[in-house]
Image (cartoon, helix red, strand yellow):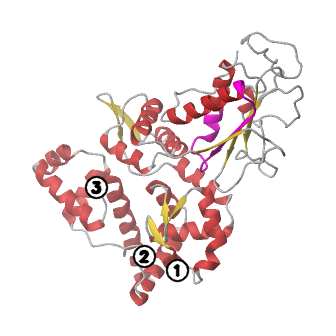
Amino acid sequence: MNSTFTPMPLRGRERELRLIREVLEYGRRSGPAVLSIEGMPGIGKTRLLREAAVLADGLGYTGHHPDQWEDPRRRRRRPAPARHTPGRPGRPGRCHGPAGPVLVLVDDTRRAVDGPPRMPFARREWTGGDPVVWLVAHRPGEGPELPAGLTGRSERLPLGPLGPSPALGLAHDLLGAPPAPALVQLIDQAGGHPRLLIELLTGLQEEGALETVDGEVRLLTPRLPARLDTRVRATLERFSPECRQLLCVASLLGCEVVYEDLAQMLRTSVSALLPALEEVAATGVVRNDGGRAVFSNPLLRRLIADSMPDSLRLSLQREAAALRATAGFVAAPPAGPELSEQQRVLVGLVREGLTNQQIARRLALSPHTVNYHLRRLFKTFGVSSRIDLLTAAEHLDTAGRAAARARQN
């Protein structure tokens, strides 16, 4: 039985698939072509190449097979798939060189642990004038490696995040039911990053942090799953020390960081940061916006900040606060205000995942009053969602405990 590699529908990539089909049609009619698919890790480049393989199958292409996209470390040994004769899909042909259009899929992002980029199949020279279409996936700033002297049509396809509607559709596919409002807010934090969203929801399911009530999936805790934290830490380990340092410091300074402020925090100049900034831009975690570095999504920034030990994170926050006080430095806000007992109770009920109506019943207040107090909390912490409020309150509690321990010592 053939294994499938598309367990869920592809969401939000209609425009990209149209361009891929157009390039494949061109290859059949007119000759060689190259389509370069560029995007940050986890944005869906490999999945799009798989869909391209399916499209090419229907158009009579040879030279690819879906089974070759499995991780070789987990794939069982199996006989090599037979070549399919063009024009007769589903029936094995003779094992000979390609006849007709040939598709070459190259994923320069799927690297072995300590080896060169892996490819679905080895490069080779085709004779007989058969048209060849190359689809190459790579990260920003890392140009694809192509054969010398390649001519024909050339297209570039930047792959960005999913829009809100496709992201919710992907969440529905994963969960089997629509997410409740509190979970939607957390999903929005992923910024349309498919892999981040999949890891988030899978981790929440594994840890029992979700439950289905009245046909919708509700979030039981604002705590992020360990699975997501582990994946982000592993990703950071693949970057250079300079890149990791820059990302960690920037994550504490805000979603938008002025380069001069970042250089001041790192006791260096903007020009000295250029190599690390180029590497950071290539990861796609941060994008350049004039004189600022802007994180691609709030959830990733939070995960990078949380990847540091509490003591280190608090020390960096104090250092940023000192620079802000002495040099007009625009950095992360101070630890935060003191909460009243009523506000702490309200935050605790929000942490339980209760709606405004449920909180109102619990506290014998009107929903309007609960909404008023929540908006005041949002304004106090400078946030715009319940998830951000809980994150800010958690950091405030951590800072308070650290300060108490410091006073005792």
The spot of residue 310 in percent (x, y) is 50, 68
Residue 397 shown left or right of residue 162 in the figure? left
Residue 113 higher or lower than 321, as above or below: above
User: Pointer 3: what residue?
Assistant: 348
Q: Nearer the viewer, residue 158 or 378?
A: 158
In three-dimensional space, the C-alpha distance between marks 2 and 3, rounded to whole angstroms, equals: 28 Å
Assess whether mark 2 and mark 1 are in contact (beta carbons under 8 angstroms).
yes
Say which of marks 2 and 3 sits in front: 2
- Residue 378 figure quarter: bottom left
As helix, strand or loop, the secondary structure at mark 3 comes to helix
As helix, strand or loop, the secondary structure at mark 1 comes to helix
Residue interval drawn in magenta: 28-49
Q: Residue at x 77, y 50 (%)?
A: 113
The spot of residue 124 in percent (x, y) is 88, 35
Q: Nearer the viewer, residue 53 or 304?
A: 53
| Residue 345 magenta | no
User: Pointer 2: what residue?
Assistant: 331
